Every structure is written in structure tokens, then in C-alpha cells.
């Protein structure tokens, strides 16, 4: 019986196991800094992937990929990793601070912010083109962050409400509902039940990029894939999609990092 249990434990730990496996890699960057990279072997992974978020750097390997291939991939992407860490550090210094934060990202630019005393905690975009943050003296940081999150979501819903009627004709149906949430990599998704999820960082991006993501997800109601047919549907509705996709690839991580910094508790 004990021998059988040992064999079962060994099978679970074997390289072909379906369980996610974790390890660490010590990486030296070009500037001499040492970085502890989390290594994750995932049976669901189809390719080697490197990501950076508030938890640090993570390298994900398919189960069949060798450690040597992972090390090579990591070293080939050291410059990219350094850039992402710099963006993370920038975001960490951009926490929302009453009477100190002087601007906020919105629609692809930094908009001046004015702090005011008021009865309620509220953020508005005024006719003068400035943001006005009204807050009682006793309001704490969580209330400020909640008001900022509500503001971004309200701006996002207003934009979607403006664009959606333009694209729904010709679709089999409208999205069942639309939700906004913070994501680490994706900008949007369409669930099988028709629920569309959009990243809360989208109102920080330029409007054309936000509109492209909306069109992209709506086209998944026609093609639940990224086949040539899918991209033809996108092209027919939004011919400039390549330019906006490149913008998001270049600026996206910074936008997401800024939102994380502003809403960090």
C-alpha cells in the first residue's frame, strides 16, 4: 500500500503531470540589477509567455518546453522586461493623492485636475476642460479611489453608448450586457452568453483605440475566433484597426500600469 502511494505521488510530480508547476529564475538585467522571475509550467499554455504586473515578472512555459528554451526566451526579452519594470515603477509613484495629484489620464492625454471641498466625493469633467474633484475633508483614500473608478466607468459607458448604435445593425444580436473590470493583459472579451467585458483602462486610451476594442469584441458575435473571416468583419467596420492595435501594443501596458497606480490601495 505504501509503495502504491509513493508511485502515485511520483506520478503527480512527473514532468508530464497536468498540475501547474512553479519555480524561480534569477536574472541579471543589463543595468546590473538582479531580478527574481517566477517560472510557471502550465499544461494549458501553448507558447512561452513573459508578463509583468504588480506581483513581479513571470515566465510561463508549456509543459513540453525545455528550461533552456525558457532561459533563452527570458534573456532575449531583457530590454522589454526593463521597460515594463520602469512602467511599473512609474505607476507606483502615481497613486491618487488629495491636493497633490494635479492631472489624470483621460482619452489619450493628461487632463488638469483641481481639488475642491464639497459635501460629497465626486469627480467631474467640467466645461472648462478641467477635472474637478470635490471631496469632504473627512473623506479617506478609499473614497477617493472609489470615486475615480466610478468616474472612469461612467466615461467608458458613455462612450460605448455613443458608439454601439452605429455597429449593432448587421450583428445577430446586441451584447447581453457589458461589464468593466481591470485586467492584466486583455482589453476585452466576449463570453458565450453574450456578456462583453471591457478593460477599465480603456477610457485612459485615445478614443479611437477604445472604439476599435469595442468593434473587435462585437465582431466575436459573428465569428467566435480570430480567423481571416473575423478580421474581415473588423476591417469592414473599422478600417483603421491596425493603427489602433499598434497603439495599444505600444502604450497599453503604461495605461494599465497608470490605472493600477491610481487605484492601488
Image (cartoon, grey):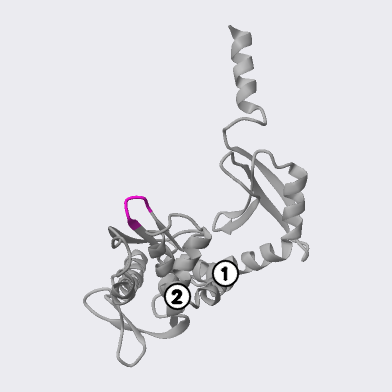
User: Could you tell me how far apart the alpha carbons at marks 1 and 2 are, in whole angstroms?
Assistant: 18 Å
The quadrant the C terminus occupies is bottom left
Instruction: Name the residue that disc number 2 marks.
Output: 238
Q: Main secondary structure of the magenta part?
A: loop
Q: Sequence-wise, which precedes: disc 1 or disc 2?
A: 2
Q: Residue furthest top?
A: 1
Disc on res. 249: 1
Q: Is residue 138 above or below residue 81?
A: below
* Residue 99 rendering spot, x and y as whole percentages: 40, 80
Q: Is residue 87 above or below residue 190?
A: below
User: In what element is the residue under mark 2?
Assistant: loop
Q: Which residue is at a point 60% across and 11% down the rendered structure image?
A: 4
Q: Which residue is at a point 31% across and 71% down the rendered structure image?
A: 157
Q: Nearer the viewer, residue 153 or 139?
A: 153
Q: Is 209 one of the magenta-colored residues?
A: no
Residue 110 visible in the picture: yes
Residue range highlighted in magenta: 191-195
Q: Is residue 33 above or below residue 242?
A: above
Q: Nearer the viewer, residue 58 or 187?
A: 187
User: In what element is the residue under mark 1?
Assistant: helix
The quadrant the N terminus occupies is top right
Q: Nearer the viewer, residue 27 or 41?
A: 41
Location of residue 20 by image quarter: top right
Q: Residue furthest left?
A: 119
Dot 1 and dot 2 residues touching (CB under 8 Å): no
Q: Residue furthest bottom?
A: 128
Amino acid at each position: 500500500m505504501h509503495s502504491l502511494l509513493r508511485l502515485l505521488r511520483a506520478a503527480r510530480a512527473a514532468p508530464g503531470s497536468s498540475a501547474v508547476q512553479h519555480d524561480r529564475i534569477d536574472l541579471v538585467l543589463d543595468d546590473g540589477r538582479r531580478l527574481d522571475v517566477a517560472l510557471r509550467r502550465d499544461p494549458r499554455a501553448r507558447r512561452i509567455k513573459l508578463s509583468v504586473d504588480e506581483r513581479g515578472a513571470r515566465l510561463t512555459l508549456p509543459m513540453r518546453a525545455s528550461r533552456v528554451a525558457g532561459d533563452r526566451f527570458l534573456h532575449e526579452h531583457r530590454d522589454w522586461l526593463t521597460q515594463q519594470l520602469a512602467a511599473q515603477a512609474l505607476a507606483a509613484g502615481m497613486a491618487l493623492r488629495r491636493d497633490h495629484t494635479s492631472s489624470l489620464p483621460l482619452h489619450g492625454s493628461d487632463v488638469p485636475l483641481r481639488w475642491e471641498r464639497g459635501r460629497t466625493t465626486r469627480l467631474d469633467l467640467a466645461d472648462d476642460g478641467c477635472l474637478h474633484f470635490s471631496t469632504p475633508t473627512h473623506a479617506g483614500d478609499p473614497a477617493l479611489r472609489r470615486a475615480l473608478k466610478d468616474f472612469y466607468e461612467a466615461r467608458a459607458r458613455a462612450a460605448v453608448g455613443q458608439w454601439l448604435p452605429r455597429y449593432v445593425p448587421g450583428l445577430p444580436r446586441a451584447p447581453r450586457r457589458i461589464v468593466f473590470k481591470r485586467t492584466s493583459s486583455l482589453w476585452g472579451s466576449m463570453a458565450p452568453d453574450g456578456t462583453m467585458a471591457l478593460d477599465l483602462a480603456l477610457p485612459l486610451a485615445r478614443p479611437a483605440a477604445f472604439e476599435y476594442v469595442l468593434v473587435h469584441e462585437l465582431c466575436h458575435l459573428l465569428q467566435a475566433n480570430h480567423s481571416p473571416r473575423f478580421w474581415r468583419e473588423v476591417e469592414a467596420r473599422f478600417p483603421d484597426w491596425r493603427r489602433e492595435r499598434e497603439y495599444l501594443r505600444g502604450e497599453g501596458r503604461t495605461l494599465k500600469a497608470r490605472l493600477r497606480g491610481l487605484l492601488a490601495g
